[in-house]
Image (tube, rainbow, N blue to C red):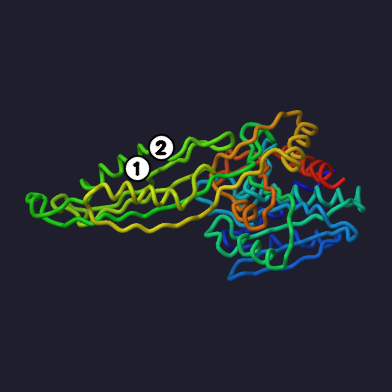
Amino acid sequence: MTSNTLQLARDLIAINSLTPNDKGCQILMIDRLKKIGFEVDNLKFGEVDNFWATRRDGSNDTPMFVFAGHTDVVPVGDNWKTDPFKPVVIDGMLYGRGAADMKGSLAAMITATEQFVVDFPKHKGSIGFLITSDEEGPATHGTVKVCEYLKAQKETIDYCLVGEPSSSKYLGDVIKNGRRGSLNGRLTLIGKQGHIAYPHLANNPIHLAMPALDALCNELWDEGNDYFPATSFQISNINSGTGVTNVIPGTVEVVFNFRYSTQSTHEDLQQRVLAILAQYNFEYKIDWEHSGYPFLTPKGNLVNACVEAIKIVKGLDSKLSTSGGTSDGRFIAPILEAQVVELGPLNATIHQVDECVSVQDLEDLSIIYYQILKNILL
């Protein structure tokens, strides 16, 4: 059923689609979808290529099941053992940038849909594809813009499967049924620069920052819930100083991030940070960037369809998880009010040198996607 999944994955990997450049990956996908009855809207926002493709029954368009993903890849890095854009199979593993994240998933989505339409041309409901080339970059002109466009068009998505590499040790062992929210902060504490031998004439902002940072690091923001771990506060960068040893700096900049559960909101976290900072006697400014709301798809039609498909194809009992970073599901779930899961190959080599995916896993992933389509649309 899936003999051409590997070839399509090769064709996609061979295109150097460094984010946010698609370079023709979407054309390959669109051509195949049109051949099986999909109507396609090319949606370019800024310099980013996106498309929305649908195959509707006509008599009963619901439910709408959507495959979502991205054609862009991260920079390759150095010292690959193979050319990252000349895909090659070695010992059953397909090597190339994007093999696991996420051109392998895109290939499996296409081949699964092709076979499903051949086998069940009169299936109920509709099938959609929401594809962007701006997931690995700023993600400002990709899925979020498409979702806003679809909402304005009164388009409804019931179920969405994002092909992010969710698996840990075995294909299908983990399904991401939600993601934590992400809130970034950039805190600048303002002291007074001076000679390090005359500290009484200066005011060291690094010293000022330490008690406040300790309080932020030790604050219990929430305890999480049955689906989410406790909200995490992490400092990623501290920058200060002039580069010499005899000058007390005038400022210190602290960059931090919250990965937060549904027990908190980004507004509440901001207010609590400000309340802690207010306990200390220093001048500061703070800039916020909210990069994603948390979302959760509890057990129900979509989760059950995925769990059952993996059990049938791989014999595994999948684990539901909300761990890890963010994905475009953070736009699809809240904007379009859709049930969203992430299900794809192993994530062991994503964004790394020598990224690879098992050829057998690609074939099995196509079969899993095919079975999910059956579970939802038959």
Q: Which x, y percent locates residue 110?
A: 77, 52
Residue 152 location, quadrant = bottom right
Residues packed near mark 1 inside 10 Å, few (<14), some (14 to 19) or many (20 plus):
some
Picture coordinates of residue 319, whole percent (x, y)? 65, 32
Q: Taking the image as drawn, is residue 81 in sight?
A: no
252 sits left or right of 349 in the view: left
Q: Nearer the viewer, residue 41 or 181?
A: 181
- Element marked by disc 1: helix
Q: Position of residue 265 (x, y in %)?
A: 49, 49
Residue 347 is at least partly visible in this image: yes
Q: Which residue is mark 2?
A: 220
Decide: is 173 above or below 331: above
On-image quarter of the C terminus: top right
Identity of the residue drawn at 41% across and 57% down: 288
Looking at the rendered structure, the secondary structure element under dot 2 is: loop
Amino acid type, callout 2: Leu
Amino acid under disc 1: Leu
